[in-house]
Image (cartoon, rainbow, N blue to C red):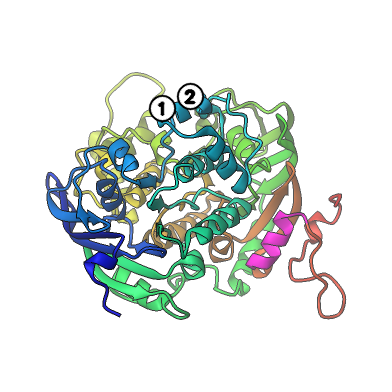
């Protein structure tokens, strides 16, 4: 059916935006019908976030026309767009960190009763509104942002990677709430790299590539392949084949690697780690040559675990050993000094956004300076260039890292440690909000690092990543390790059941199911 302008809730045509030499949008178009959930798809750097910021008045376009319910609009600020019924929940929380939640709500004139109802619908009705925003975890902040947007019942709600930082239980709540808007006179523009979510709730998908709209697809069974083809210009199916990589079905390669790693002395040993009310008793070994996955629902202690390992917080109990020697960290520099480097999900925490790619990567070398003296600049340049090439970092915007796409920013944080040399890498959801191509590059890099003798600890909120890249996985529930699962058995149902601390389903002969939780058999259920 041909859709005319009067039948559209929102229409954007010929939208363009450049930042100096970087073209963020060439000619983007988007048409959204009333009552639909419309996916906005594209690889990182395709222009999705820029288009959303233009639609909400956060960025002024260089060209283009935008109409809402047939009326042409030019908005100059998110507040103006909000008053006009257009609201976005961005990738990063838009709350002021040093204000409490109630004060943040007052700044946007959010109706408190409607906000509380939305927060309850999203599963976080017990959040203390007197808490400072900076004291709350990222997932909670994102839900608060969404509840604040829902409270004013906008005509157009834009969700930019809303579920990327959420565990499965909160993601389900978000999808339920979005589903209730479907079929009304309001609409949702939904950005996600998770195809399963697109298939579950979206009606159509507009695909951007290199700043241009390259197609609009009706979301039907089997349409995922067409969407990916438009996004990348080629069909990408799973992880690139390579020697030593985890096979798609968790086959012999991962089992062989796990066996080899088990014969080596641990690089990192954690015993009975405790911190606060969430981390109660976590023990595990991480060996050279392996990628060990960590799976957990929101608030089960994974944040505290990585804080302890990275030296951001001191444990209240338990011990750590690195290369067989006792270790205690009072500062992240102490962890780095013994070879534990951290890659965070929030790229803004790790990067100097106003500095160049090269300067950010070269920071790794300053951690090794014991005395004042001359830096070997040719050697530094060689290693920085090597890391940029290895991770295929887009350096068109080398003036400032903040000009890069989210995926390229994350690659810069990883490149910093690759350039400096990696022994043990702690990765906390490193592919959150990153496109398919960049995810694959990071998967391959983590495997390459492990194959070269590094040890990698990987927490991910996307369960399918476990089988793609990990050799084995520990599952944390209630601040304790409740399961250990081999890569061959790490399918999504098994991981999700373990994450909820449910017994594995019986196997064909009435024995243990595919989760193979033998290593956690002594854990109390």
Please say whether residue 498 is one of the residues in the magenta stretch. yes
The main secondary structure of the magenta stretch is helix
Residue in the picture at 45% in, 71% down: 242
- Vertical position of residue 439 compared to residue 239: above or below: above
Q: Position of residue 412 (x, y in %)?
A: 35, 45
Image position of 484 (left or right of 43)? right
Q: Nearer the viewer, residue 168 or 176?
A: 176
Q: Position of residue 151 (x, y in %)?
A: 49, 42
| Residue 263 appears in the figure | no
Image quadrant in which you'd find residue 58: top left
Image quadrant in which you'd find residue 473: bottom right
Q: Position of residue 282 (x, y in %)?
A: 73, 41
Q: Tell me the residue that label 1 is attached to.
A: 107
Image position of 190 (left or right of 400)? right
Image position of 91 (left or right of 355)? right
Local crowd at mark 2 within 10 Å, few (<14), some, or many (≥20)?
A: some
Range of magenta residues: 491-501
Alpha-carbon span between mark 2 and mark 1: 6 Å
- Vertical position of residue 524 compared to residue 105: above or below: below
Q: Nearer the viewer, residue 421 or 86?
A: 86
Q: Quadrant of the N terminus?
A: bottom left
Cβ atoms under marks 2 and 1 closer than 8 Å? yes
Q: Nearer the viewer, residue 230 or 269?
A: 230
- Which element is circle 2 on? helix
- Vertical position of residue 502 compared to residue 376: above or below: below
Q: Tell me the residue that label 2 is attached to.
A: 103
- Which element is circle 1 on? helix
Residue in the picture at 26% in, 37% down: 77
Q: Furthest residue to the top? A: 372
């Amino acid at each position: 059916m041909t859709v005319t302008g009067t039948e559209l809730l929102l229409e954007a045509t010929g939208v363009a935006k450049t930042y100096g030499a970087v073209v963020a949008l060439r000619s983007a178009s988007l048409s959204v019908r009333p009552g639909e959930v419309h996916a906005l798809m594209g690889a990182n750097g395709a222009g999705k976030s820029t288009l959303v910021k233009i639609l909400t008045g956060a960025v002024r376009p260089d060209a283009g026309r935008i109409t809402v319910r047939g009326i042409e609009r030019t908005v100059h600020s998110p507040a103006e767009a909000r008053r006009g019924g257009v609201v976005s929940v961005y990738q990063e929380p838009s709350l002021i960190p040093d204000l409490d939640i109630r004060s943040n709500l007052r700044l946007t004139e959010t109706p408190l009763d409607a906000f509380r109802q939305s927060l309850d619908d999203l599963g976080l009705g017990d959040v203390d509104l007197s808490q400072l925003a900076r004291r709350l975890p990222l997932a909670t902040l994102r839900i608060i942002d969404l509840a604040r947007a829902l409270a004013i019942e906008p005509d157009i709600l834009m969700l930019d990677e809303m579920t990327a930082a959420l565990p499965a239980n909160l993601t389900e709540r978000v999808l339920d709430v979005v589903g209730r808007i479907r079929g009304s006179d309001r609409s949702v523009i939904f950005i996600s790299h998770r195809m399963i979510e697109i298939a579950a709730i979206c009606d159509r998908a507009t695909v951007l590539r290199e700043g241009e709209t390259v197609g609009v697809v009706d979301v039907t069974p089997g349409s995922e392949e067409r969407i990916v083809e438009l996004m990348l210009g080629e069909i990408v199916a799973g992880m690139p084949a390579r020697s030593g990589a985890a096979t798609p079905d968790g086959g012999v390669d991962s089992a062989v690697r796990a066996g080899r790693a088990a014969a080596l002395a641990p690089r990192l040993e954690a015993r009975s780690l405790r911190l606060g009310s969430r981390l109660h008793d976590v023990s595990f070994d991480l060996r050279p040559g392996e990628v060990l996955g960590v799976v957990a629902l929101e608030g089960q202690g994974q944040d505290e675990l990585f804080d302890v390992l990275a030296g951001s917080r001191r444990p209240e109990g338990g011990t750590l050993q690195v290369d067989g020697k006792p270790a205690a960290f009072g500062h992240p520099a102490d962890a780095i000094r013994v070879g534990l480097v951290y890659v965070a999900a929030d790229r803004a925490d790790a990067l100097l956004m106003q500095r160049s790619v090269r300067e950010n990567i070269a920071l790794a070398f300053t951690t090794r300076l014991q005395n004042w003296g001359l830096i070997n600049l040719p050697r530094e340049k060689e290693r920085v260039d090597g890391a940029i090439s290895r991770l295929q970092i887009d350096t068109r915007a080398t003036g400032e890292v903040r000009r890069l796409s989210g995926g390229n920013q994350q690659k810069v944080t990883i490149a910093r440690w690759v350039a400096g040399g990696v022994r043990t890498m702690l990765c906390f959801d490193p592919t959150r909000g990153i496109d398919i191509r960049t995810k694959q590059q990071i998967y391959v890099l983590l495997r390459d690092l492990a194959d070269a003798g590094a040890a990698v600890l990987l927490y991910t909120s996307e369960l399918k990543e476990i089988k793609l890249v990990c050799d084995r996985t520990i599952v944390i529930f209630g601040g304790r390790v409740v399961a250990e699962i081999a890569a061959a058995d790490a399918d999504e149902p098994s991981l999700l059941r373990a994450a909820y601390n449910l017994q594995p389903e019986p196997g064909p002969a009435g024995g243990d199911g595919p989760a193979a939780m033998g290593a956690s058999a002594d854990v109390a259920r």
